[in-house]
Amino acid sequence: MATQHRHTIVIVGGGSAGIATASSLLKRSPMLDIAIVEPKSEHYYQPGWTMVGGGVFRAPVTMRAMKDVMPKGVEWLKTAVKSFDPDNNAVMLEDGAILFYELLIVAPGIKLDWGRIAGLEATLGRHGVTSNYRYDLAPYTWQLVQQTKSGRAIFTQPPMPIKCAGAPQKAMYLSCDEWRDRGVLGDIDVEFHNAGPSLFGVADYVPALMEYVEKYGIGLNFTSNLVAVDGEAKQATFATANGEVTKDFEMIHVVPPQVAPDFLRDSPLAAESGFVEVDDFTLRHKRYANVFGLGDAGSMGNAKTAAAARKQAPIVAVNALSVLAGGEPVAAYDGYGSCPLTVEKGKIVLAEFGYGGKLLPTFPKWMIDGTRPRRLSWLLKSEILPWVYWNGMLKGHEWLVKPDTPVAS
Ligand SMILES: Cc1cc2nc3c(=O)[nH]c(=O)nc-3n(C[C@H](O)[C@H](O)[C@H](O)COP(=O)(O)OP(=O)(O)OC[C@H]3O[C@@H](n4cnc5c(N)ncnc54)[C@H](O)[C@@H]3O)c2cc1C
């Protein structure tokens, strides 16, 4: 007979969202019986990978041992979830065990679907083909930026949804800034190919970004979707409204298409999109009252960012505790997400917005005008936010994100 485990709360995924939620729960209820299912030995601060690709951080500062970020008192089951059986309050684990819960929190992130681009996986990390979307490849981006002196440099963005929708551009601006510094930008033909129709989804930030596009001389190509890469031939093929177009490149920074993880997509918990089907505001599952979902795996229409998870985690914590006690959710998420667009080394356009593209700045405009490039925003990204991530968010300190509800303590 299969091994059986039982826990009051089971959290799927020990990433940004899963760890932050566990810590927020334990802050409110220190004796709570929580298990986190997480197969990896390492935990990553992925927002730092843009800085690694830009030569600002070294890769190891974005990684910590998973055991060191697991909140004390949580039971870590170091295996993956294989499938969900929400009608029986159970999840099946890869190691063959069955895990029963009173309340389930689903946070396994988003799947990077490298295989959807023909030829890509075989050439990643070689022949000038790179991506800041992988820990091991972000240093290669910086290496390529330093080596490139002429030729075409291509930066791609796949169809939405993706995590951190600004990251494809951030890689491009930081590269251009370095080339400008070294006096070679004029010899490099920089192109941005976006499967979508515009530079950024929230119009308020576009003017500042366009100033940089013009300053760096970037060629913009919208509805141009990367479909194949031939590393050895140094050629990339795009599907466009006018058919397929193939381009030579010296280097290419690829952002992979992204989809819901297979085991979630194929489960009763999935929405049509494949993501966990939760209410946009309470983050409770629409059909299973004792299931919550958050982070990149959620069906909500927010920008998929760690900043969003930072806001969502305390909301899930107070709502989950209320449901466990026999009540209803009491806190609501406003769709907050944030995307610090690194337009040059030392300056950032700090996009912060919620559902419907409503601007939700954390700081008053006189301090940081998020629609303009600002040095203070760079300080936030390079120094303050990483510290807040490791020492605040993952430890249950809800600075500036405490839910506005009588239940919050
Ligand atoms: C290049 C890049 C730049 C970014 N820049 C920013 C930024 O500037 N600002 C910002 O706020 N955000 C940024 N992000 C996005 C941010 O990192 C994610 O939105 C955030 O990590 C989402 O948290 P999560 O917990 O949902 O997913 P993750 O942190 O990815 O964690 C998911 C976890 O689930 C685990 N898991 C997967 N499958 C299973 C399974 N079957 N069973 C159990 N566990 C499983 C995984 O191992 C992983 O540990 C960036 C991301 C990238 C890649």
Image (cartoon, rainbow, N blue to C red):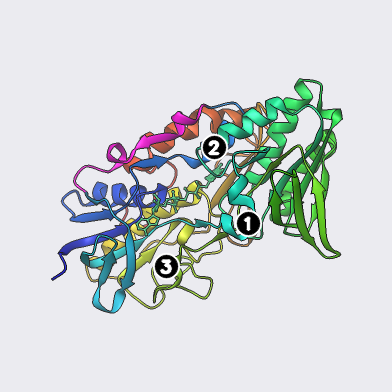
Give me the residue at 36% from left, 40% from top. 42
Res. 151 visible in picture? yes
> Label 1 belongs to which residue?
358
Q: Is mark 2 within 8 Å of ligand 1?
A: yes
For residue 35, which quarter of the picture? Answer: bottom left
Residue 231 location, x and y as percent?
69, 45
- Tell me: is circle 3 under 8 Å from ligand 1: yes
Under circle 3, the secondary element is helix
Residue 373 visible in the current orientation: no
Q: Is residue 218 magenta?
A: no
Q: Nearer the viewer, mark 2 or mark 1?
A: 2
Can you identify the residue that label 3 sits on? 264
Q: Considering depth in this image, is 49 or 338 the residue closer to the camera?
A: 49
Residue under numbered circle 2: 49
Over which residues does the magenta segment extend? 58-74
Characterize the local packing of mark 1: few (<14), some (14-19) or many (20 or more) Cα atoms within 10 angstroms.
Answer: some
Task: Give the image quarter of residue 399.
Answer: top left
Residue 200 location (% of width, % of height): 71, 52
Left or right: 122 as drawn, with respect to 41: right
